[in-house]
Amino acid sequence: MLQCHDSCLVTYDPNIRPALLGSHNEAKTIFEELVPLTDVVKLSDDDAHWLYPGTALEDIAARVLALGAELAVITTGSSGSLLSTAATQLTIPAVATQVADTIGAGDSYMSALIHGLLNRTGEGLTPSVLETIGRSASMAAAITVSRPGANPPTWAELDAELTQPRFGDPFKAAAQPA
């Protein structure tokens, strides 16, 4: 990470598993040492609350940004996700979905997030870019949870869902600046 963090996009999704970690203090210290070497950090709400118990998600995102990440993302399952930069904080609603299995949802979300970040066209992380990327990532997670097993969508499946005309918005509510 030290060698490449200035020359490529570095993302970090720690997938915290307390049973596999040392002490809370040790795990938090390692997390906070790695964040400055990253551009994007994605945490689930469970990961965020484990690292910073009793702290609001918006404050946890602000802490991640203060440590040096350019984008902090916190997913909250069926409640959507929070995308934060120094200038913007957006809440992206989840896609209403019949859940078959939650395995792979976070990885599908992260994959679509990375795809969106790598394919933005020099627009930076404006609110409209964040909304587009967040909605795509939410849709990828929704497709994954709608079927059994860790079965993420292909790009063609995701693109078809995002461009398909619908009766109403598949998102529970419009994304609003937080």
Image (cartoon, rainbow, N blue to C red):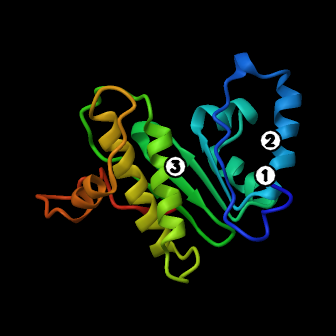
- Tell me the crowding category of disc 1: few under 14, some 14 to 19, or many 20 or more residues within 10 angstroms, Cα based: many
Disc 2: which residue? 31
Instruction: Name the residue: 31% across, 47% down.
Output: 95
Depth order, front residue of 137/77: 137
Q: On residue 166, which mark appears?
A: none
Going from the N terminus, do you reach mark 3 or mark 1 first? 1
Q: CA distance from mark 3 to mark 1?
A: 16 Å
The answer to whether any part of residue 174 appears in the image is: yes
Q: State yes or no: discs 2 and 1 in contact (Cβ < 8 Å).
A: yes
| Residue farthest front in this picture | 3
Marks 2 and 3, the one that precedes in the sequence: 2
Asked which secondary structure carries label 1, the reply is helix
Q: Is residue 17 above or below residue 162?
A: above
The residue carrying pointer 3 sits among few (fewer than 14), some (14 to 19) or many (20 or more) residues within 10 Å by Cα, namely many
Answer whether labels 2 and 3 touch (C-beta < 8 Å): no
- Residue bearing the label numbered 3: 110
